[in-house]
Image (tube, rainbow, N blue to C red):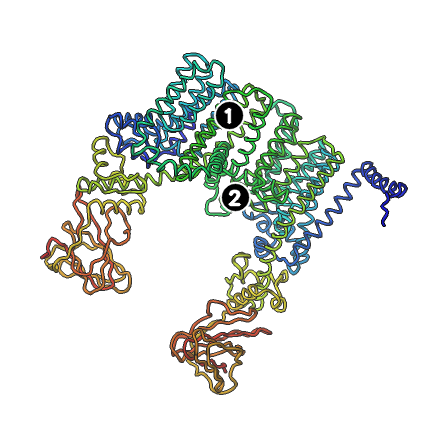
Amino acid sequence: MALAAIVIYRKGLGTTFFFDEWEFVMDRQPWRWDILLTPYNGHLSLVPVLVFKALFATVGLGPYWVYRVVLIGFHLLCVGLVFAYARRRVGNAPAVCAAALVLFLGTAWHDLLVPFQIGFLGSVAGGVAMLIALDRRTLGGDVVAALGLAVSLSSSSIGIAFALAAFVEVLWLPGRWPRVWLAAVPFALYCAWYIDYRNSPQSIRAAVGPLEPALRANLPQLGSYMTSAAATAFGALVGLGSNWGEVLLVAAAAIVLVRLAGRGPLSPRLVALLVAILAYWGLLAAFRAQIVAPGESRYVYGGVVLILLVVLELAAGRRLGVEGLVLVACLVAFSAVGNYAVLRSGSLSLQDSATHIRAELGALEVAGRSVDPNYVPDQARTQGVRAGPYLAVVRAHGSPADSPAEIALQADPVRVEADGVLEHALGVTVRPAASASTAAPPVQLVSVGGGTVGRRGGCLVLRPGGPGAFVELVLPPGGALVSPQGRSPVAYSLRHFAAAYALPLGTVTRTSSIRVGRARTALTWYLRLQASQSVEACAAGGGRA
Amino acid sequence: MTTVTSPPRAREQPRRAGARGWVDEARARPLAVSVAVLGLLMLAAAVNLYRKGLGLTFNYDEWNWVMNRRGWSTATLLNPHNEHLSLIPVLIFKLLFATVGIDTYWPYRVVVIVAHLTCVALIFVLARRRVGDVFALALAALILFVGSAWEDLLWPFQVGYLGSVAFGLGMFVALDRRDRTGDILACVLLALSIASASVGLPFAGAALVEVVLRRREPWNSSGRWRDAWIVGIPIGLYLIWFAIYGNPNATPGNVHGFALVRENGPAVPSYAADMASNAFAGLFGLAIDWGRPLVVGALAIGIWWSLRRGQTTRLFALIAALALFWGLTALFRAQLGDAGSSRYIYPGAVLIVLLAAELFRGVRATVRAAVVAALVVLFAAVANYGPLKAGSAHLQDWSSYVRPELGALQIAGPTAPPTLAPDPLRAPDITAAKYFPAERQLGSPADTPAEMRVRGEPQREAADGVLIAGLQAGLRPTRAEASSRGAAPPLESSGGAATTPSGGCVSLRATAPGAFAVITVPRAGLIVANTGAGNAEVRIRSFGDNFPAAPLGSVAPGQAALLAIPPRAGIVWHAQVTVPGTARVCARR
């Protein structure tokens, strides 16, 4: 577990708050009941919201690694619970192997690297804890089971599958009614929450649209979606893709059917787990088929744990010989290596995304309060974080963003994006102006290409020698006056952090002043003018505009 | 009215007796019958493989050896090829260079077929000791007809892989003797296996497992490791070779050495699993998707059977060989993403059938089982014929380009630009500078002009491309006057243009867009004078029926250009002049 924790921790280095997490960061700051209980994408997210709020209040937004450590803690808890569940059924060594299959489940990288997924892991941990407690068949065990189920349900909707398993098991066993409360109470609370919040902006209706059309559209795909999700989980279990998972799924289904059709007594737990696994993939298909692929990384974890629980139930009471243990250990090693490949590629995609997010937010913070509060720096990666609320949160809890020095160390495409944010945040103003005075302070030339540059007083005059001619200058503090010497438009671009320019911000066809709004601190901007005819650039401060 | 009667008992009896007699005879002398059947099957397979390789010439990597391995220095023999030690295949090729040259390709193909038949025979020998003649025959026949591995069966370059497998199988036969002679033989054969290709390394792993596990002494006693020399000597020699000649940067792709291992390491399980399914599917001539259930089924049966019946030393050795073959290939080739490649099927399939024989050691075929086995082999043989045929067509297609392209290079002659590569795709190692010395020394596999003329149009166009580049034909600006004396160049056809012979020229005037005239190029050349507006374009062809899409050059308005092509015996050039306005095309004096 220490090894897995180190590997997962290292693979999460360089990441920051990802997509859904920004909803928690931006919208779950106050301490009100509805903030805790408002659903997220249809899930009751009480546990993850509480964890995130506790971290906001204690460590703030700066050290993201703390969030990742909490996630890794949830993962190790799940692994430990799977081990505890397994060792009662198959003994210590096979239980270690079963737990190790979950421990190195890199195909579920989303659940291992994005702290938001403590919701899913919390549901799994609560569910497995409930099953372990149910094994005890004592009042104390039942109380723990009820608590486990409550945690599972209040972490995410995955808890519903475990709730159904609890109902099946309790009702299957003799003396069923006195114990049914352990499932009924948490589930009743969940239903009450659902009814109370069914119309909230993040309810399941809001997430998937009106339920009836969504279900009607998804039901025909139920079979194929469920089998695809199951195949992905089976493939992940052995470190391979879903094409291998399909074969394993068919083999596993055959074994289960033979077991169900056989003469031996059926264990209530086996039936309960089969109901849970079908409910897990079935609910996923019913409510997510229209928006996400069945092979999504974040849905692998729950499927794999439930598959393992079924396997352990089928194998309960059997003992593996040395040869069998060696074979299972080889399978675990094979699975771990195969899963590492997927974890690595998932980690790379998250790191890439985080690099952009941190730089963009860093640029936003450089711009400071002058930014339009409704400006959204990155619609795709940050779930539409708006500048005003973001800066308010940063003031309260610290910043996850890059400092200007850190932005300067990023790759150029990232710095270009940061420049884009900075330009939008500060605002680039282009206004028609009168001709510049040659007595204006001198403009500092940076580079020239495709033509020659001469000076007229303090101004620079670009004389193009061919297409693509440009002149680059340091934007004077008061802005620049750009005077095209003909009718063709002059394209202008700006940069601050980057070494390269993005696409031109616009064109001017007559004498105009170009200036950038003031940031918290004075910034050096570079202005590039691209022209097919002569153009003069002067400092706006000395002009007559 | 027709009367239906049963056949007289007297006539039915001898037939039944005959059939039963045949079965009895087969039971009485199973080895002789099996060998006879296997011989017939091998003959049929050899004829089929030979026929499927007709029309081929040296392909891709083979050209590297033709171009670069003609000397007799140690480096020529020992330099790695794609990081493989290729001593044995290089020696075979050099022997053939010295005896039959490169005029004829069939002796090379015969060698690879013989290597394949040797492998099949050795599989039979190994399997019959374990599962009897009938199942051994079936297992050998599965490999005999494994057409999915067409690259290994049709491409003589793959004698390296087949050599490794054959020597590796020989090593197993020798290890079966369990005596000093057998051990020495195994050591020698393992060295030869490694010297054929890196496929020998999995056999080394297998040998190590076997010689260590077959002794029952404690692990820390020297007795347990007493026979490790059988593997130690070949591996030691290999390491010495690697230290002197090995090149970790010889792996294909941009990443090499430890970085490659780091990059490919996590991909090993999925790549190796795909290789396994490809080998299983290939055995039965099926697509890789069928291989996955076969792998899972085989694993389940294998584990169940071995837990029931116990495991042998050889079983572990073969598992080690398979794991090493798929694992090492994944580690050093995963960056290419070709786990389904035909050439990886053969070694995997051979080890799988050996594993099956070892797993079911002691099982003997009943008549019913023999019939089922025969049906399975028949199915596999028929299904495998498809991939073999497709592979043959692919190789023949490539040869059909390379041979006329080389023919064109030879027509151009040694004056061709030294760096001219006639086919960078199919024969990237050939350049004019290397080809002509090889041709002088070893002969020519190229088409003659007559053979080139009967090739398909794309191949003839490709040959024209090489010939144009080889002769450095082109348009050169000229100030020479378009002659009005002498005969006009022969006009072959025209379209959308009014053509008027005048003096020694043909005058063209476009009457429709895309106007052109096709003119036979005189020996001394053509002068194209563009007298109208827009560029006039010139294209030429000799062997092809169509002109290339890209023009040889263009002539600006008011300019004239000379099309001069160095003459070659029997080669006639045709020029297509496309004009937007008017032009004069004259024979050069």
Q: Residue furthest right?
A: B10
**Which quadrant of the figure has residue A261?**
top right
Q: Residues within 10 Å of mark 2 (few under 14, many from 20)?
A: many
Quadrant (top left, top right, bottom left, bottom right) of the N terminus of chain A: top left
Q: Amino acid at mark 1?
A: Val
Chain of residue at mark 2: B
Q: Residues within 10 Å of mark 1 (few under 14, many from 20)?
A: many
Q: Amino acid at mark 2?
A: Arg
**Which quadrant of the figure has residue A388?**
top left
- Horizontal arrangement in the rendering, residue B483 relative to residue A395 (left or right): right
Residue holding disc 2: B333
**Which residue is painted at 74% across and 49% down in the image?**
B43
> Which of the labelled discs sits on residue A29, or is there none?
none
Residue holding disc 1: A310
Q: Nearest the camera: B214 or B399? A: B399
Chain of residue at mark 1: A
- Residue A411 in picture, x, y percent from top left: 32, 45
Is residue B421 among the parts visible in the rendering? yes
Q: Is residue A161 above or below residue A386?
A: above
**Which residue is painted at 21% across and 44% down in the image?**
A425
